[in-house]
Image (cartoon, rainbow, N blue to C red):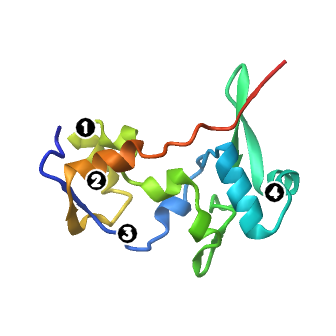
Amino acid sequence: MFYDNGLRFQCQMCRYCCSSEPGFVYLSDKEIKEEAEYLGLERDAFLDQYCRMVDCGEYSLVSLKEKENYDCIFLTEKGCGIYPVRPHQCSQYPFWKSIMQTREAWENEKNYCPGIGKGDLIPKREIEKRMKDGEPPLMIFRKK
């Protein structure tokens, strides 16, 4: 793999991955539970207030809502409003399988993320752990 010798990444707190473009932050049932508890809400209240259903054909997935400017619903001036329980998808960035498939994809991500190529060297073993470790099963709703 192109990352056999490790890669450098250190979040620069630019918030680009939390804002600027439309996207989806898919949630698992466990994440929904943890985030609702963190905010002191019942599960259904959390879903109503902070989530949306994403139509995927015969089923739907749960994603966090976005603000009108495409910022994550939890992005504040101080950063992530649910940082201690942020979704797995957020905590594993930029070590997503789609970004890690090729060197070109990794290099292209530099156009968006100023933390790529900075910081301590992250070894291959840690990169692969981040890519697969604890990937939660998404919350799927089948359509009738």
Q: Is residue 134 visible?
A: yes
Q: Position of residue 115 (x, y in %)?
A: 32, 66
> Mark 2 to mark 1: distance in Å?
17 Å
Q: Quadrant of the C terminus?
A: top right
Q: Quadrant of residue 92?
A: bottom left
Q: Is residue 65 visible?
A: no
Among numbered discs 3 and 1, the one appearing first in the sequence = 3
**Which residue shows up at 38% across the image and 58% down it?**
112
Q: Position of residue 82 (x, y in %)?
A: 64, 68
What is the secondary structure assignment of the residue under circle 3? Answer: loop
Q: Nearer the viewer, mark 2 or mark 1?
A: 2
Q: Amino acid at mark 3?
A: Cys
**Which residue is identified by label 4?**
46
Q: Quadrant of the N terminus?
A: top left
What is the secondary structure assignment of the residue under circle 2? Answer: helix
- Tag 4: Cα neighbours inside 10 Å, few (<14), some, or many (≥20)? some
Q: Position of residue 110 (x, y in %)?
A: 30, 57
136 lies above or below 47:
above
Q: Nearer the viewer, mark 3 or mark 4?
A: 4
Q: Amino acid at mark 4?
A: Phe
What is the secondary structure assignment of the residue under circle 1? Answer: loop
Res 126 label: 2
Among numbered discs 2 and 4, the one appearing first in the sequence = 4
> Mark 2 to mark 3: distance in Å?
16 Å
Q: Are marks 2 and 3 in contact (CB under 8 Å)?
A: no
Among numbered discs 2 and 3, the one appearing first in the sequence = 3
**Which residue is identified by label 1?**
102
**Which residue is identified by label 3?**
11
> Mark 2 to mark 4: distance in Å?
33 Å
